[in-house]
Amino acid sequence: MERMNLNILGLAEVRWTGAGSMKLGSKTLIYSGGHTHERGVGILFVVTTAKSLGSWCPISDRVVVAKLVAKPLNPGIIQVYAPTSDSEDVEVEKYYEEIEKAKGYLKSQGIIIVMGDFNAKVGDERVEDVVGPSDKGTVNERGSRLIEWCQVNDFTITNTWFQNHPRRQWTWKSPGD
């Protein structure tokens, strides 16, 4: 089995209440949840990267933000978990307001990375410098909203610029089959 070396891992659907940080072995987890065991986001740092964690702020059960101290630029990370396509428009607008609040927290950072589960399909058509040619499927309503937000804020959806391996199809067998 291949081993992945990750310094930072964004988590969605953490499903913990409240907000906090904790040590998990040699790793540090920051998380932000709501009042119920739904949604929730977190960022997991290996020990060397956790030493660069300047501060962090739980915005909501959909957004958590971290400031890192590095050279030559200080990166900021926003981890998100977007509302699904069956969510009300009001919830989607609130989510984008929370991302704006997180960006405000990072105004002194040199680089801002927004990562997470956007629950959006941005299609396979190139859109300026926002969407590359390597995504799958057809753009949906949440994808259109994400593209629009990226255009206004000068962000790029980076995973659409690289050819991805085909996703593995899993089949499950019940015990005794």
Image (cartoon, helix red, strand yellow):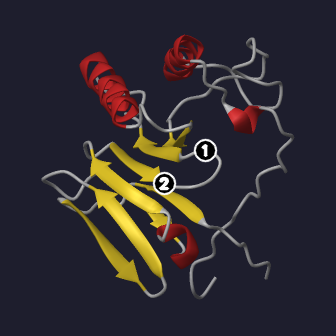
On the image, which quarter does residue 101 sit in? top left
164 horizontally vs 88: left or right = right
Amino acid tagged 1: Leu
Q: Image point 26% across, 42% down: which residue?
A: 59
Q: Can residue 13 be seen in this view?
A: yes
Left or right of residue 170, residue 68 in this image: left
Q: Is mark 2 on a helix, strand or loop?
A: strand
Q: Which of 53 and 98 is in front in this view?
A: 53
Which residue is disc 1 drawn over?
Answer: 73
Secondary-structure class at tag 1: loop
Tell me where residue 105 appears, x and y as whole percent: 34, 36
Q: Which of marks 1 and 2 is nearer the N terminus?
A: 2
Quadrant for the C terminus in the image: bottom right
Badge 2 amino acid: Leu
Q: In which quarter of the image is residue 121?
A: top right
The one of 53 and 92 positioned closer to us in this rendering: 53
Q: Residue 68 carries which label?
A: 2
Q: What residue is rendered at 61% in x and 67% in y?
A: 7
